[in-house]
Amino acid sequence: MSYPVLYIYHSMSSPLPWQSCGNSWNTDKCTEISGNSSFFTSNGSITTPEDEFFHNRLLRMSPDITHIGGVVWPVFWSNVICWVIVYLCICNGVKSVGKIVYFTVLFPYVVLTALFIRGVTLPGAWKGILFYILPDWGQLKKPKVWADAATQLFYSLGPGWGGLIGMASFNKFHYKNLRSSIIIPLVNSGTSIWAGFVVFSVLGFAADRSGVPVGEVATAGPGLAFITYPAAVSMMPAPNLWAVTFFVMLFFLGIDSMFVTIEAILSGVVDEIPACRTRKKLITFITCLVLFSLSIICNTEGGLHVIGLLDAHVAIACTPLVCGLEIIAALYTYGPRRLSADIRFMTGRPLGRLWLVVWRYIVPVILVVITAYSLKDAAGPAGWCVALVSVICIPIYAIQLLFKSKGTLIERIRENCRPNNEWGPADPEMRHLWKAAINKNKNRDIQLNNLDI
C-alpha cells in the first residue's frame, strides 16, 4: 500500500514527475516516449522515465536481493501512514470494519467505471481490448501460465489465508453459505475481468500513441501498475486527475485486503486466548506493530526483491500446502459424514456427493501439482527458508498438542484427530440442538448397521 500512497503524493505535481527524463534521478539511458518511438518499455539499451522514476526515484532499488541496502525513508513513512490508518479502522472490531468496507469496496467500482468510460473513448483503445479478449491458445501449453492463474486465484479469493474463515465466523449460524460460496468467486472473477478492460483500453491508447504493438506495452508484475499504466496516464488529457484517481483506487483495494488479513489473525488469537477479548484494542495495536516491524525490510532498497521472493514462495507454494492441510483436517480427520451432517444442521440442506468427491480427490491432486511445480523453482536457500518459515507454526503447534496429550504416540495422535469437548456451536441453545441432532444420526447409523448384520 505504500507505493500507491507515494504515487498519489507525486501525482499532485504538474507536470507529472515521471513524464520526462530531465530529473536528477534519470540516467543517460532514459528515453522519453514519442510517437515514432520503437520502444515503450525498458530494454538493455534504453529505459523509460516511468521505469527510472519507479526504480531510481521511488524505490532507489538495489541490483539484487543480496544487497538489501538502507531504509528508503519516503517508503517507510508511507508504510507508517498505511498502518496507522489500518489500526484506526479495525481497532473497534469487525462491526466498525463492516461500515468502512461499504465505502472502500464500492468506491473502487465507481473508479473502475469512470476509468473504463474514459479509456474506451481514447483513440486506439479497442486495439488494447481486442488484445485482451482474443485468446492465444498456444499459451495454455505452458505450465507457467497455469501457475500464474493459480497465483491470481490464491491472491484474489484468499483461500488458505484465513480471511474467508475469519469473516465467515461472524455470520449468523444458519447463514446460507452455499449462496455466498458461489457469489463471491463470480463477483471476484467478474471484477478481475472488468479491471482488465479498464487497463487494456488505456494500454491500447498508449500503444497507438507510441506506434508499437500492445504486446510490447503490456508488462507483468508491479511494472503494469507502477510503470506502464502511469506512462499511459501521462499521455491522457488531465493526467494528474486520472493518476490520482487510479492510485487512490489501488490504495483502497490494498487496505481492504489488509482489513481481512489482520482480522483473521486477531480472530485466531482471541479464539485461542479468550482473555484477550477484553483487551481487543491492545491486541490489535500489538498485532499491527509486529506486522509493521516485519514489513520494514520491504521498505529498504532491496525491498522489491524481498516482495518478489515472498510472492513466489508464500502465495504460490505455501498457500496450496495450507489449503491441502485444511482438506485433510475437514475431509479425512473430521470425516465427510460429520462434515455433511454439520452443514445440513446449519443450512437445512444436505451436502451433495459431488462436493465431497471434488474436495476429497480432485482438489488435493491439483494442490499437490501446484505446490510441486512452484517449489521446483525455489530461489535457493532464501526461497526455501521463506517457504519453511511461512508454515513452520503448523508442525510446532501439532507437536505441542502431542506433548500435552497422554498415552502412547498412537493414542495421542488419535486423541488429537478427534473433536474435543469444546467443539460445536458457541451458542448454548444451538449447541444443545446440535448435540441432539448428532445423537440422532448416531442412533440411525447403529440401526442401519444392525439391519446390515
Image (tube, rainbow, N blue to C red):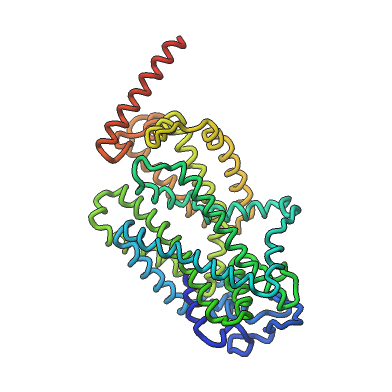
- In the rendered image, which quarter contains the C terminus? top left
Please state if 345 lies on the left or on the right of 358 as rendered.
left
Q: Could you say where residue 43 lies in the image, as x and y percent from the top left?
A: 71, 75
* Residue 367 shows up from this direction: yes
* Residue 41 shows up from this direction: no
Please state if 97 lies on the left or on the right of 229 as rendered.
left
Q: Quadrant location of residue 192? A: bottom right
Q: Give me the residue at 34% from left, 62% from top.
A: 90
Please state if 363 lies on the left or on the right of 48 as rendered.
left
| Towards the viewer: 311 or 190 | 190
Please state if 251 lies on the left or on the right of 418 as rendered.
right
Number of callouts in the render? Answer: 0
Q: Is residue 163 above or below residue 245?
A: above
| Towards the viewer: 253 or 388 | 253
Q: Give me the residue at 71% from left, 78% from top.
A: 209
Q: Could you say where residue 326 lies in the image, as x and y percent from the top left?
A: 47, 42
| Towards the viewer: 25 or 341 | 341
Q: Could you say where residue 236 lies in the image, as x and y percent from the top left?
A: 62, 79
Q: Could you say where residue 226 lies in the image, as x and y percent from the top left?
A: 58, 73
Q: Give me the residue at 64% from left, 80% from top.
A: 235
Q: Quadrant location of residue 398? A: top left
